[in-house]
Image (cartoon, rainbow, N blue to C red):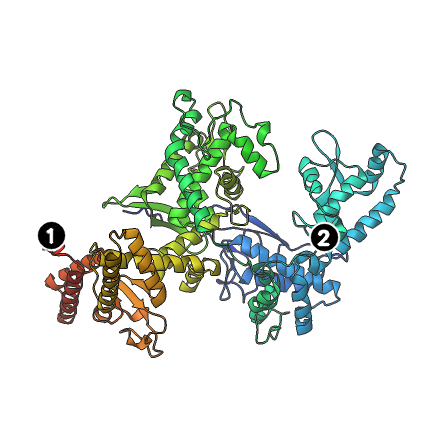
């Protein structure tokens, strides 16, 4: 049976300074808040095994003041940051999302004070429109961070009093008197970027972009030490004057302008909020779609690239893992190394950690170096990546959930089926058991063996870690004992190494963990014969069905899905016409006869008709008619474009099929019915269920009569798609 685990009891902390209108239980703060409400730095719990996060409210503004100097702004921002995770307006479970909401609220407050607006209730529609247009180019455009940093640097350059004739050591000495700096392990002066930005009134900077380039150039001007990655970055940079502002994605823009929506929705709990919406007749989502660029969610990985990636990850788990695990244990396996192939890790270099061949920032060059040989730790990191890919592709779990897996997380039930115990981070926030195939069990087994020595050393149950034979250090865990394996980073590198085919334009697809979750959803709904939205929603552990439907829809996959549907339909019809399977139902019989006539015409024209050629002709028939088989648990619904929709037995008042109202009874004699033997297992299990109800002496009369009707219909249904031999076996 699936594993079960009870949730630990929540501890309540008394905090009487929380506004009474916000607290779920007056006086007590929620378990996710680890500091007092009145503190200007909050520590909040994230989901699952992720480390705690810090939300800083005491930030410095460009005018030299801090957010607490504007108590009304601080109070509203705190109340919203609290309310989005607790209370009637709760919309998030993740600490990282909550942290981002606080950041965007503070960004709005900083913009307001720079424009001499000191209360949220004073914001106008014109302000919201101007802010949204700036937000289309990101936080730096909203706050004019480039201008602020430029003015701050100019003041310090004047203070440094550089002369063109200054030698490097003298220029560096003058810079140290004007600019914040620190020394590295070699006692060499380095620019303290974080302090410089803070002194300029800039809260934080992106890791790349115009601010980073300005700081890179400042280091050159001051003769400060530059790290190798900085030199590499500068070699590819264009002059600042030639940099164009880039529009952010639709999703990023939506997050930046959502503070206006929060200020309106939470108005009843705020002393300074928005009494009226600033987006009448619209919403932040619609504004973001109009102004942002269309890249608002995880892209769908192309089918060919996904298939190669998953297949070669499975190869690592099945073929290469035994040798790598033996090497980790110090065994001599040189005589039995598997044959080299483009995606194999062999040969393994006889050194501890690195090879100069792949110490490069260019991943393509690094890949070429790795193919000449890699170290054992690098191979083990790639092995963990391959295992994570297999688990993600065949279980549809999030990256954080996969990295939090523990030893003993998978077992078989009494029927021999595999169940994986996993902690769901975003929605249920608890342990649950999900069904998985054998290949996931193989990946888990590899990880358990790989992590065994590390788990024995540190007592941690997590399986995404390992220890080398001659080391007492465990790799894959952070200092706090939480999994820290960089799945996202290694996923990208692994994709290069295993030689995933390039896209048609010659570029390489960048893989991300969440793409495998979406791929699972799309394949389940559109390819699997018994795909069901409700079952998928439960498997993904979504709050609502609409979130699941967004996973299964994608413009770029529309063509692929439609082709797959046509191929699937053509295959079934060809199998039926060739007598390999039996189809039934009004529409099923009609299409079978049409396919049979096509087969007869082909046999007259040709001496030999291959099954492949016949299926191709069937494909053309499917394309002409436009029929697509919509799978229900007991059969297909074959609705054609342009057909009379109310002819379907489950059609609602709107004259369109209502699959939610469809049953075995409604579909049994429906003109759109299309039955194949693929649904027999479900029908047999349902038949057995109603048989037990009929035979039970305690069944009420009304239920027994209903089950007798269904039992008869199911028997006829099964008989219509069964061969005489199958019916004989069943009896």
The residue closer to the viewer here, 257 or 653, is 653
Above or below: residue 77 compared with residue 309: below
Quarter of the figure with residue 175: top right
196 on left or right of 286: right
Using a 10 Å C-alpha cutoff, classify the residue at mark 2 as few (fewer than 14 neighbours), some (14 to 19) or many (20 or more).
few
Q: Position of residue 718 (x, y in %)?
A: 17, 61
* Residue drawn at the location 15% of the way across and 65% of the way down: 716
| Circle number at residue 729 | 1
Q: Is mark 1 in CB contact (under 8 Å) with mark 2?
A: no
Residue 185 % position (x, y): 69, 30
What SS does tag 2 mark?
loop
Which one is nearer the viewer's eye here, 449 or 667? 667
Q: Position of residue 215 (x, y in %)?
A: 74, 45
Q: Is residue 406 visible?
A: no
Q: CA distance from mark 1 to mark 2?
A: 74 Å
Residue at the spot of label 2 = 243
Residue at the image point whose x is 20% and y is 60% from the top? 686
Q: Is residue 579 left or right of residue 401?
A: left
Which of the 4 quarters of the picture holds residue 131? Answer: bottom right
Q: Earlier in the sequence, mark 1 or mark 2?
A: 2
Q: Dot 1 lies on which element? A: helix
Which percent across, then down, holds residue 6?
A: 36, 49
* Neighbour tally class for label 1: few under 14, some 14-19, many 20 plus, Cα within 10 Å: few
What quarter of the picture does the C terminus occupy?
bottom left
Instruction: Please indicate whether residue 83 sits to the left or right of residue 532 in the image.
Output: right
Residue 720: numbered disc: none
Q: Image quadrant of residue 266?
A: bottom right
Does residue 305 appear anywhere in the picture?
yes
């Amino acid at each position: 049976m699936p594993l079960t685990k009870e949730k630990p009891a929540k501890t309540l902390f008394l905090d009487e300074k929380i506004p009474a209108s916000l607290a779920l239980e007056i006086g007590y703060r929620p378990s996710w808040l680890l500091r007092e409400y009145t503190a200007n730095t909050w520590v909040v719990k994230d989901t699952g095994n992720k480390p705690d996060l810090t939300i800083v409210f005491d930030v410095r503004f460009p005018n030299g003041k801090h957010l607490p100097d504007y108590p009304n702004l601080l109070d509203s921002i705190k109340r919203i940051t609290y309310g989005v995770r607790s209370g009637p307006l709760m919309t998030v479970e993740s600490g990282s999302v909550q942290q981002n909401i606080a950041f965007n609220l503070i960004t709005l407050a900083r913009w307001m004070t720079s424009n001499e607006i000191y209360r949220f209730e004073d914001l106008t529609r014109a302000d919201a429109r101007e802010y949204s247009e700036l937000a289309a180019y990101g936080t730096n455009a909203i706050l004019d961070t480039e201008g602020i940093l430029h003015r701050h640097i100019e003041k310090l350059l004047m203070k440094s009093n550089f002369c063109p004739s200054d030698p490097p050591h003298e220029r560096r000495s003058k810079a140290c008197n004007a600019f914040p700096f620190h020394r590295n392990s070699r006692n060499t002066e380095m620019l303290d970027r974080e302090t410089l930005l803070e002194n300029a009134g800039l809260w934080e900077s992106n890791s790349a972009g115009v601010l980073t380039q300005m700081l890179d150039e400042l280091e050159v001007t001051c003769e400060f030490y530059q790290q190798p990655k900085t030199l590499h970055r500068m070699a590819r940079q264009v002059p600042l004057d030639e940099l164009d502002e880039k529009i952010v994605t639709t999703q990023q823009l939506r997050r930046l302008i959502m503070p206006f929506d929060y200020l309106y929705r939470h108005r009843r709990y705020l002393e300074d909020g928005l009494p009226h919406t600033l987006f009448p007749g619209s919403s932040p989502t619609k504004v973001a779609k109009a102004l942002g660029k269309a890249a608002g969610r995880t892209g769908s990985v192309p089918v060919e690239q996904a298939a190669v990636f998953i297949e070669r990850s499975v190869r690592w788990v099945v073929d290469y893992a035994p040798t790598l695990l033996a090497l980790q244990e110090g065994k001599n396996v040189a005589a039995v190394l598997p044959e080299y192939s483009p995606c194999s890790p062999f040969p393994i270099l006889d050194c501890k950690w690195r090879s100069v061949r792949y110490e490069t920032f260019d991943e393509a060059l690094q890949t070429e170096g790795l193919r000449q040989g890699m170290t054992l730790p690098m191979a083990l990191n790639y092995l963990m990546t391959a295992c994570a890919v297999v688990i993600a592709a065949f279980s549809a779990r999030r990256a954080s959930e996969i990295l939090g897996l523990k030893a003993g997380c998978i077992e078989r039930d009494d029927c021999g089926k595999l169940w994986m115990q996993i902690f769901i981070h975003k929605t249920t926030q608890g342990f649950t058991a999900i069904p998985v195939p054998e290949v996931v069990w193989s990946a888990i087994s590899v990880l358990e063996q790989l992590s065994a020595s590390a788990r024995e050393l540190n007592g941690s149950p997590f399986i995404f870690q390992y220890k080398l034979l001659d080391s007492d250090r465990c790799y894959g865990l952070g200092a706090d004992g939480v999994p820290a394996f960089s799945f996202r980073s290694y996923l990208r590198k692994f994709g290069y190494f295993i030689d995933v085919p390039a896209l048609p334009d010659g570029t390489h697809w960048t893989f991300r963990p969440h793409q495998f979750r979406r791929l699972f959803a799309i394949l389940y709904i559109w390819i699997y014969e018994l795909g069901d939205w409700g079952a998928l929603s439960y498997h993904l552990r979504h709050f609502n069905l609409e979130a699941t439907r967004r996973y299964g829809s994608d413009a770029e996959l529309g063509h692929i899905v439609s082709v797959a549907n046509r191929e699937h339909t053509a295959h079934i019809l060809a199998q039926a016409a060739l007598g390999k399977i039996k189809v039934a139902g009004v529409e099923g019989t009609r299409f079978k006869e049409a396919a049979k006539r096509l087969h007869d015409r082909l046999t007259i024209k040709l001496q030999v008709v291959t099954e492949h050629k016949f299926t191709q002709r069937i494909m053309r028939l499917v394309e002409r008619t436009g029929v697509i088989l919509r799978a229900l648990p007991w059969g297909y619904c074959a609705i054609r474009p342009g057909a009379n929709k109310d002819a379907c037995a489950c059609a609602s008042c709107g004259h369109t099929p209502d699959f939610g109202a469809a049953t075995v009874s409604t579909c049994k004699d429906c003109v759109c019915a299309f039955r194949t033997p693929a649904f027999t297992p479900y029908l047999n299990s349902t038949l057995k269920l109603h048989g037990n109800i009929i035979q039970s002496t305690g069944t009420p009369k009304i239920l027994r009569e209903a089950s007798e009707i269904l039992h008869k219909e199911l028997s006829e249904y099964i008989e219509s798609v069964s061969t005489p031999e199958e019916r004989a076996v069943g009896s």
